[in-house]
Image (tube, grey):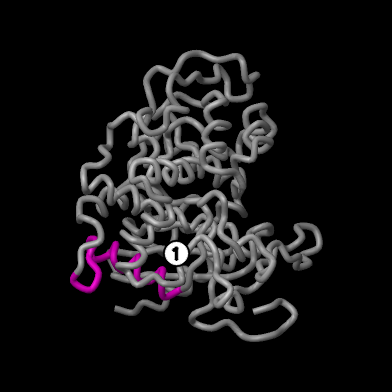
Amino acid sequence: MRHDGGAPMRQDTIFRMASTSKPVTIAAAMVLLDECRLRLDDLVEPWLPELADRRVLKRVDGPLDDTVPARRPITVRDLLTSTFGIGMDLTSLGTPIMDAIFEQGLTPNPMLEPDEWMRRLGALPLMHQPGERWQYHTSSDLLGVLVARVTGQSFATFLRERVLDPLGMTDTAFHVPADKIDRLPPSYVPDPQTGEFNVWDDAKEGRWSRPPVFQDGGGGLVSTADDYHAYFRMLLTGGMHDGERILSRPAVELMTTNSLTPEQNAARTAMARDNVHVGFGQGQHGGWGFGMAVRTYRGDYAPIGQFGWDGGTGTAVYADPDNQLVGILLTQVGMSTPDSARLIHDFWTTLYQAIDD
């Protein structure tokens, strides 16, 4: 489990899932849609008043006070499709708005109380008009706050009661308790120049050794291969698990169907093209559903319809309806160099070339 030796990985080793949290945490919002406690085109303002009366930058690289009024309010659909107007845009690094997002501690891995996080988010202009452009990550964190405010429970509690516990995902959470911490390996980030392995997060004194103040739907989960297999098998069976319905079939179909126009998807294409070793995963061959990528064209060995996502800590999980398979790769090596991403790519090539009909 350590780069310098020690105990080997086991089936119940716990991993930091990073952005592969997104396909799982989105399910909490889908439960609320199924129960009509949320609707796709509801305005979010009743629960998230910090996002009322938005102003939008005239230019994404312009000063923060050079804005126009938003053409319309933000909706639940905008959050689910990652198009509400703010995100972690790797093509806009160094602009005033991206600098402000980082300086305010909004992303990645927020360490603020949810209400303070919302206050700071609401003080910034949108980068794009609501519903106009796909932008990464922030919507997933925002959905966690929305779920908590709608339900009156913490995001973690609602997710556990309605999704994780019914699926038997006992090792999936936003932190690792003391009696399981020995199953969490260190997380490494290789030096981009030398390739030397540097510890990014240790286990016993690390970020996941205690409950977080912000339950990060975009990248905060820890989990195991068995837990993620249970979740993605549930999606493959249309929302069922061991005879119990977790999500409705239409909810799963919405999650796993491309929701973006070609113009909106251009932002995802640019992120992959301009940051190849960061976005070099299965998810760069098509569109985006709710909380995950959806493959809409044949770009390598995987078929159209495959859905899932990758994580910056070296994780990748996708389901393939055509072949009725779930592929899970969990490592502890972050994607700071091309080698980590190539490993993920080679995993999927190896998996698909082994299928013999």
In this rendering, the answer to whether 325 lies above or below 82 is below
Q: Nearer the viewer, residue 329 or 160?
A: 160
Say left or right for 322 vs 129.
left
Tell me what residue is drawn at x 50 percent, y 13 percent.
68
User: What residue lies at 48% left-to-right and 68% top-to-bottom?
Assistant: 223
The picture places residue 218, in percent across and down from the top left corner, at: 50, 50
- Which of the 4 quarters of the picture holds residue 38? top left
Most frequent secondary structure within the magenta stretch: helix
Q: Toward the viewer: 117 or 281?
A: 117
**Start-end of magenta stretch:** 225-243
Q: Is residue 241 magenta?
A: yes
Q: Residue at x 56, y 36 (%)?
A: 116
Q: Is residue 350 left or right of residue 167?
A: right
92 vs 179: above or below = above
Q: Residues within 10 Å of mark 1 (few under 14, many from 20)?
A: many
Q: Which of 209/67 is in front? A: 209
Where residue 146 appears, as percent x and y from the top left, is 40, 41
Give the residue pinned by disc 1.
317
Q: Residue at x 52, y 42 (%)?
A: 114
Is residue 229 highlighted in magenta? yes
Whole-percent x, y for residue 344 in the image: 54, 66
Q: Quadrant of residue 235?
A: bottom left
Above or below, 28 relative to 90: below
The outermost residue toward the front is 152
Quadrant placement of the C terminus: bottom left
